């Protein structure tokens, strides 16, 4: 039995426009066999995007020249891992865009779960409501329930 796994870790450094000694570092890593590098790029892009709104400047021209736009999902469906994989295999999207889509889905999943966990811990939702939110987040990410 063999297992195919890959890890990607990348860093993007930004400097503040008014104070070049002030820096912001975006560093992310993923372990994934098929899109880790592009998922990391997408996470770093979103980090850099937030930093630029705070006055930081991205000096990496190669990174800055990448198109991180998420393509429209096929008519009538939302992006999920299953949909993205189908579109990758059909040639409708590139491996790079596939990784960006997975990065976007992962970020959204983590956001939903973080909010739900906070709501559960504060008593704003019940354990049953938490489980429902968790299942909806899983379905949104994978395209189907994993249970």
Image (cartoon, rainbow, N blue to C red):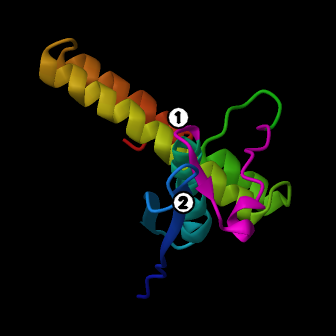
Answer above or below: position of 136 versus 66. Answer: above
Which is more foreground, mark 2 or mark 1? 2
- Say which residue label 2 marks: 14
At a point 73% along the width and 67% down the height, the residue shown is 61
Q: What mark, if any, has residue 140 been given in the picture? A: 1
Q: Main secondary structure of the magenta part?
A: loop
Q: Identify the magenta region.
A: 53-73
Q: Is residue 142 visible?
A: no
Answer above or below: position of 8 versus 69. Answer: below
Between 53 and 90, the residue placed more toward the observer is 53
Q: What mark, if any, has residue 4 been given in the picture? A: none
Q: Going from the N terminus, do you reach mark 2 or mark 1 first? A: 2
Kindly check if marks 2 and 1 are in contact, taking CB atoms under 8 A apart as contact.
no
Q: Is residue 139 left or right of residue 64?
A: left
C-alpha distance separating marks 2 and 1: 33 Å
At a point 58% along the width and 51% down the height, the residue shown is 17
Residue 29 at x, y percent in the picture: 43, 67
Circle 2 crowding by C-alpha within 10 Å: few under 14, some 14–19, many from 20: many
Q: Quadrant of residue 109?
A: top left
Between 56 and 147, the residue placed more toward the observer is 56
Residue 54 at x, y percent in the picture: 52, 39
Residue 128 at x, y percent in the picture: 22, 19
Circle 1 crowding by C-alpha within 10 Å: few under 14, some 14–19, many from 20: many
Q: Is residue 55 left or right of residue 90?
A: left
Residue 104 at x, y percent in the picture: 57, 45
Between 130 and 22, the residue placed more toward the observer is 22
């Amino acid at each position: 039995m063999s297992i195919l796994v890959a890890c990607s870790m990348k860093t993007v450094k930004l400097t503040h426009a008014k104070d070049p000694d002030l820096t912001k570092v975006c560093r992310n890593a993923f372990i994934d066999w098929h899109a880790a590098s592009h998922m990391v790029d997408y996470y770093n892009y979103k980090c850099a995007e937030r930093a630029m709104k705070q006055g930081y400047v991205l000096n990496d021209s190669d990174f800055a020249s990448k198109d991180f736009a998420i393509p429209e999902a096929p008519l009538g469906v939302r992006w999920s891992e299953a949909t993205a994989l189908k579109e990758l295999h059909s040639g409708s999207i590139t491996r790079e865009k596939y990784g960006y889509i997975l990065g976007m889905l992962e970020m959204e999943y983590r956001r939903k779960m973080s909010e739900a966990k906070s709501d559960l811990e504060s008593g704003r939702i019940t354990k049953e409501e938490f489980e429902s939110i968790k299942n909806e987040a899983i379905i949104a990410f994978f395209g189907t329930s994993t249970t």
